[in-house]
Image (cartoon, rainbow, N blue to C red):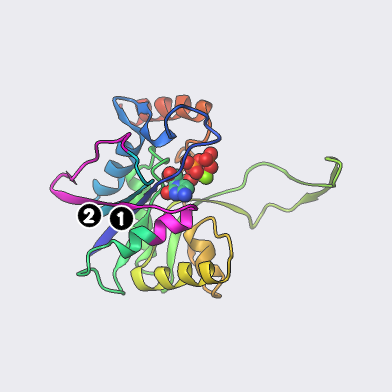
Amino acid sequence: MTWAVVPAAGRGTRFGAPLPKQYLALAGRLVIEHSLRAVLDHPGVDGAVVALAPGDDDWPGWREVGGKPVLTCTGGAERADSVLAALHALPASLDEQQWVLVHDAARPCLHRDDLARLLELGQADPVGALLAAPVRDTLKRADDQGHSQATEPRESLWRALTPQLFRRGGLTRALEAARRAGAAVTDEAMAMERLGLKPRLVEGREDNLKITTPADLALAEFILSRSSE
Ligand code: CTP
Ligand code: MG
């Protein structure tokens, strides 16, 4: 059994809309609805827990998608807190060894082929895996005055995307350890790496973008219009 965890308790500060970005309309649905449907569409994903901000009533919520349960819980101050809250809200029947797929509510353009490959390769890995894209730009290291002082090799650098796939018990322990240490972990893989574990990088599509600014929403509209052709 594999469940999804969808952190959706952010405020969308950088986007700057009156509503958090996950509740904005996109191609006939809300952003969060695309993200949730993208993970639940896969036959190997059995249900989802969505972490919402306290008092969030911008989304009436879905109780199920295609017969699969959608549960909600209250998220926390940081993304990692929201993911941890959702892990604790998973059904008790999902034991420690079961896989959990963490996917940002703000990533509505996840493609089914990427999800399928992540599940296949991640579940064959002892640690787990994440979708990621190789860095394509030339990278500059800046000095304190904003001048470029060096060019960094990019060959081994990747951008972390979601979904990220880990076992329920291992991921919960990794996020709790990061919290105890006061370490700001910005994704699940980082929490695992802190324990010396090496998640597999599964190359994903560049168009699995995270909505951060209004320009991203326009781009997502375009990406979704092409994928439904
Ligand atoms: N998220 C969350 N709980 C938080 C912060 C973020 O569940 N305390 C979720 C967001 O809702 C989003 C995902 O984590 O689905 C990625 O976060 P990000 O893109 O940073 O979204 P926001 O925090 O909402 O945006 P911003 O940082 O611009 O405020
Ligand atoms: Mg944020």
Place residue 148 in its image quadrant.
top right
Q: Amino acid at mark 2?
A: Gly
Q: Look at mark 2 in the image and give the residue it sits on.
A: 47
Q: Nearer the viewer, residue 134 or 56?
A: 56
Q: Residue 41: say if magenta.
A: no
> Badge 1 local density, few (<14 within 10 Å), some, or many (20+)?
many
Question: In the rendered image, is residue 3 in sight?
Answer: yes
> Badge 2 local density, few (<14 within 10 Å), some, or many (20+)?
many
Q: Nearer the viewer, residue 146 or 153?
A: 146
Place residue 111 in its image quadrant.
top left
Q: What stretch of residues is rendered in magenta?
A: 57-84
Marked residue nearer the N-terminal end (2 or 1): 1
Quadrant housing the C terminus: top left
* Residue ID at (40%, 26%): 221
Whether tag 2 and tag 1 are in contact, CB under 8 A, the answer is: yes
* Residue ID at (48%, 64%): 200
